[in-house]
Amino acid sequence: MSTHRSVRTRRSLTASIAAVLAVGVVLPAAANPTTATVEVTGGSLSISAPADAGSLGATANTVQGTTISGPLGQVQVDDARSAAAGSGWVASVISTAFTPDVGPAIPASAVGYTVNGIVKVGTATYTANDPADLTGASPAVTASAITGDNSATWTPTINVAVPGGMAAGVYYATITHSVL
Amino acid sequence: MAPESSAAEGQAPDSLGIRLVDAPVERRDDPRASRSIIDHLQPGAEIERRIELISTMDESVDVPLYVGAATIEDGAFVPAGRQEEGNLVTSWTSVAPPRVAVPAGGRATATVRIVVPRDAPNGEQYGVVWAELPAGGGAVRVVNRVGIRVYLSVGTGEEPASDFEIDSLQASRRRSGDAVVSARITNTGGRALDFRGELVLMDGPGGTTAGPFTAEPGSTLGVGQSSDISVVLDPEIPAGPWLARMTARSGTLEKAAEATIAFPEAAGQASDPVEATDVPVYQDRGVLVPLAIGLLVLALALVFLVWFLAKRRRDEEDEEEAATETTTMGVAE
């Protein structure tokens, strides 16, 4: 009679262990590599269309050089992505050289950018940098600690250090705002 | 066609917005993955991710879409200029169509395709998918563009684990009088991280507590890179000493560390950095812990149920056997 009972005990124990293992094995198989996607909801990261900056002004040629400054037109960046609190974006700025039709160019290293204060809407922290050298992309406005929709608006100034002895004429350049 | 105001919520008038439409299922809890294309791919793999352009402009706008290179340096994700050379990401990634007309006040969709060659080197590469507005201005042209970051990790095995260390905390005072706590963070994992930070000051003068305060701005660190994230505090904050706890987060990865610090009295001074001790982060672990507990309870219940049923059957059989034996004994007699 005791042998009979121990066989039954062993069988029930085996059955219960098997049941536990079955549950444990099923779950990990559900994971799947990168090809499966889910649709993201929420708004966009946006930048305003550039205003007509036109001319920065004119200056007379001088021996020692001078600095020309002029407004670049308003820039507005909005972040309506449904991001977790604390996310951010960076607006970088870069310039080409200032090139005339005839004569040497003024390098981008002589071009500086001043943010001039940020008008903000929403909960976020905005940090302004005034990069003095626009050869490579430099952060101009950095947003962080964003909670909910927010926008930053600024009207920057471009400063060009014109060396002495430059040729007369119009100097052309392209300044790019990159927001990401 | 009437402007789709719901598509352009939170967007300024006369602007172009971009957003990512597809994110990997396995990263659905990672807020970084809903803003940037973050993937780990095997050599030879291909993925497609849709993006959407949203316009609040009065006229239809022709938007070129293209891929640019990027690097991570000095704590920031730095895009290459429009004329600069590409990198591996730009050679593996394309956008279709390369130019899209976004209707006035409307939207348009494009598809980003990444094809990783079979001989691609292991490691993480960075890039940006750009949408560019037509240039404005006269002699000084202004180009505004908005983009989606690409953090692409390539390797034959599993995705490299992400990890970081908060090495030390340093208290200082700016010339303006603002008190600053900086945390030195090192990316010790295998993928770039975008950090946000939060500071709490405890055990202050008179048992006071201050915070939480947010670090501004955050910091992006490539593999093996170190940088500081700083929290700027009001000049009126008492000098201390304080037990400072800095919590740093990137996506779903979170760590905290503590150190005892004191702010210098004089402006323009910095105290020595103090080594930070890791502390556990108390947070709701979401689904994982309740799920594990639930499974454990279920397993125990299962074992108990099977044992109970078996025991009951055994008891019944014992009764039957006892009854049979009695009968047998009766017959033998």
Image: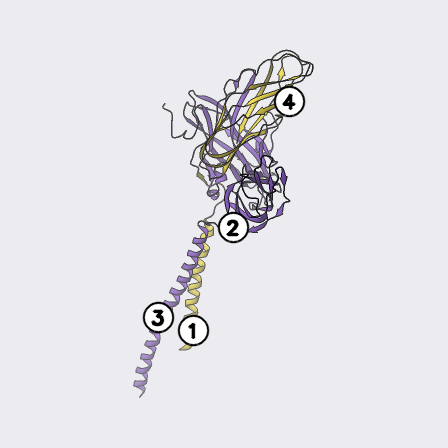
Chain colours: A yellow, B purple
The three-letter amino acid code for the residue at tag 1 is: Ser
Sequence-wise, the earlier of marks 2 and 3 is: 2
From the top left corner, tell me how far across and down residue A104 is, in percent: 67, 16
Read off the residue under disc 2: B207
- What is the distance, in whole Å, between disc 2 and disc 3 at their CAs? 62 Å
Neighbours of disc 1 within 10 Å: few (<14), some (14-19), many (20+): few
Residue A128 in sight: yes
- Circle on res. A110: 4
Q: Amino acid at mark 2?
A: Gly
The chain holding disc 2 is: B
Residue type, numbered disc 4:
Ala
- Which type of secondary structure does the marked residue at label 4 adopt? helix
From the viewer's perspective, tell me whether residue B45 is left or right of residue B101: right
Residues at marks 1 and 3, CA–CA distance in whole angstroms: 14 Å
Indicate the amino acid at tag 3: Arg
Q: Which residue is identified by label 1? A: A6
Q: Residue B161 location in percent, x, y?
A: 56, 46
Q: CA distance from mark 2 to mark 1?
A: 64 Å
What secondary structure is found at the residue carrying circle 3?
helix
Q: Are marks 2 and 3 on the same chain?
A: yes
Mark nearest the camera among 2 and 4 is: 2
Residue at the location (43% across, 73% down)?
Answer: A6
Name the residue nearer the viewer: B282 or B238. B238
Distance, label 2 to label 4, CA atoms, is 53 Å
